[in-house]
Amino acid sequence: MSKEVNKVRFWTPLRLACTVISLGLLAAFGVSSCNSNDPPNARTSSSAPTRPTALVTLPRPILDAENRAASGGPIKLADYSGKVLLVNLWATWCGPCRMETPELVKLHKEYQSRGVEMIGLSTEDPDASAESVAEFVKAYDVKYHIGWATREVAIALMQGRTNIPQSFIIARDGRIVKRFIGFRPDATPAQIRQALDEALKS
């Protein structure tokens, strides 16, 4: 009987509330980004949604690299010079990428008429993920350019930070205006809009 009383006393309303809040915070942080080196469904702890990038502009080898496209010819970032560009690194198995994609679709509809180009480059193996990427594009009604980043492009853009999604806002002059790592639904879409507006004004 005394053991049962002690058990009930241990789980006081305050302790229970603190436990629930702690688990909620851990869950929230856990879905803000995935590690691109992880197998499907693996997750890492979150990173901040935005970080300054060491790259000021995209190097020539990255601009000239031919990234495989989901449809059509290869995707070369050099073909978009002189335009405001959003480059998104993602994967079909990444939960935060799935959360972010509807927002990117909205942004594409909103900014396409203003001359903004968007490219989504999966970090997955193109042969192994061709079917899942096609299904993803259809399910989310993605109208912007989709393809796969070459290993060299992914490594150069990530600069050692392998968490995805990652997005780069690039101005018309090739300058990287902002780099985003991870996704927070309460903050990231507004921050991307702000960065796109800044790039369009420059």
Image (cartoon, rainbow, N blue to C red):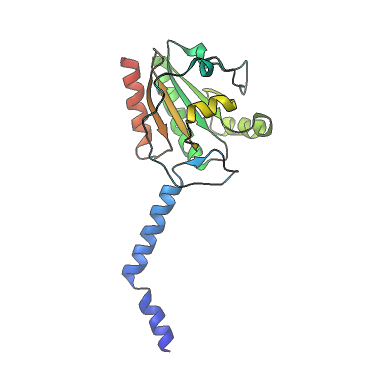
Q: Nearer the viewer, residue 134 or 92?
A: 92
Q: Is residue 139 above or below residue 173?
A: below
Q: Horizontal placement of 144 versus 106: left or right?
A: right
Residue 67 figure quarter: top right
Residue depicted at x 46% and y 11%? 81
Residue depicted at x 34% and y 32%? 190
Q: Nearer the viewer, residue 144 or 37?
A: 37
Residue 48 figure quarter: top left
Q: Can you give x and y, in whole percent of width and height, for residue 158 in the image? A: 48, 31
- Toward the right, the furthest residue is 127
- Toward the bottom, the furthest residue is 1
Q: Can you give x and y, in whole percent of width and height, for residue 41 in the image? A: 57, 46
Quadrant that contains the N terminus: bottom left
Quadrant that contains the C terminus: top left
Q: Can you give x and y, in whole percent of width and height, for residue 2 in the image? A: 40, 88
Q: Is residue 165 above or below residue 58?
A: below
Q: Is residue 75 above or below residue 13?
A: above
Asked if one can make out residue 148 in the rendered structure from this viewpoint, the answer is no
Residue depicted at x 57% and y 32%? 123
Q: Can you give x and y, in whole percent of width and height, for residue 124 in the image? A: 60, 33
Asked if one can make out residue 38 in the rendered structure from this viewpoint, the answer is yes
Q: Count the labels in the image.
A: 0
Q: Horizontal placement of 15 versus 128: left or right?
A: left
Residue depicted at x 39% and y 40%? 184
